[in-house]
Image (spheres, rainbow, N blue to C red):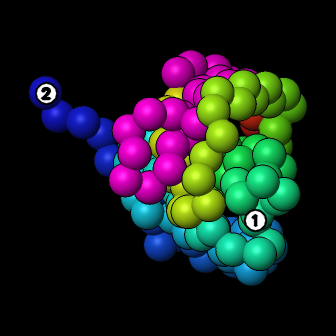
């Protein structure tokens, strides 16, 4: 079965982030891949992303989930900078070691005004998730 092409390319998504959310790249986040309804991003471990106890901070994991899900949404609707998070919930499952994290976002439902998806976050090189997020994006128009 043929899988449709994403409505925005990885390069177009990166350019959109650079223009409208430069803090994403400045924060050490990177887009690994973008497909139809999915997006994988990573964030490097470092002083900006760590917290006491030798782990990655919760706000860093939340930001990774939010931006990765944004990529998954835009992969279906195209470059819509004003699509915004309307709800997001994250469950922290285990303490990640202080190394890069991957966020794998998958769009589960796309409607005219809302998009819903999930993000599994795990440490680079480890298949066990350290966090699971679900979120809803509001689509303008």
Q: Position of residue 18 (x, y in %)?
A: 70, 77
- Secondary structure at badge 2 equals loop
In the rendered image, the residue lying farthest to the left is 1
Residue at (69%, 74%) from the top-left corner? 46
Q: Write down the residue under mark 2.
A: 1
- The quarter of the image holding the N terminus is top left
The magenta stretch is 108-135
**Left or right placement of residue 52 versus residue 61 in this view:** right
- Residue drawn where x is 78% and y is 54% of the image: 53
**Residue 108 location, x and y as percent?**
52, 21
How far apart are labels 1 and 2 at the CA level? 40 Å
Where is residue 138, by image quadrant?
A: top right
Q: Which label's residue is closer to the chain start, 1 or 2?
A: 2
Residue highlighted by disc 1: 49
Above or below 135: residue 95:
below
Can you tell which quarter of the image residue 87 is in? top right
Query: From the viewer's perspective, is the residue at label 1 or at label 2 nearer?
Result: 1
- Is 57 on the left-hand or right-hand side of 124? right
Whether residue 51 is situated above or below residue 14 in the rendered picture = above
Give percent across and percent down for residue 35: 38, 48
Residue at (80% x, 46% y) in the render: 58
Near mark 2 (Cα within 10 A), the count class, few <14, some 14-19 or many ≥20, is few
On the question of residue 16 being in view, the answer is no
Within 10 angstroms of label 1, few (less than 14), some, or many (20 or more) residues?
many
């Amino acid at each position: 079965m043929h899988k449709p092409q994403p409505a925005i390319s990885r390069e177009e998504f990166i350019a959109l982030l650079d223009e409208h959310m430069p803090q994403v790249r400045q924060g050490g986040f990177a887009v690994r891949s973008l497909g139809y309804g999915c997006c994988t991003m990573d964030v490097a471990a470092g002083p900006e992303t760590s917290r006491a106890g030798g782990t990655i901070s919760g706000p860093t994991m939340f930001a990774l989930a939010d931006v990765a899900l944004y990529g998954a949404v835009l992969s279906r609707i195209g470059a819509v900078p004003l699509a915004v998070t309307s709800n997001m919930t994250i469950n922290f499952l285990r303490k990640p070691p202080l190394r890069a994290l991957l966020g794998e976002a998958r769009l589960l439902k796309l409607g005219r005004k809302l998009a819903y998806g999930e993000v599994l976050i795990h440490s680079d090189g480890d298949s066990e998730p350290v966090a699971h997020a679900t979120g809803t994006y509001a689509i303008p128009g």
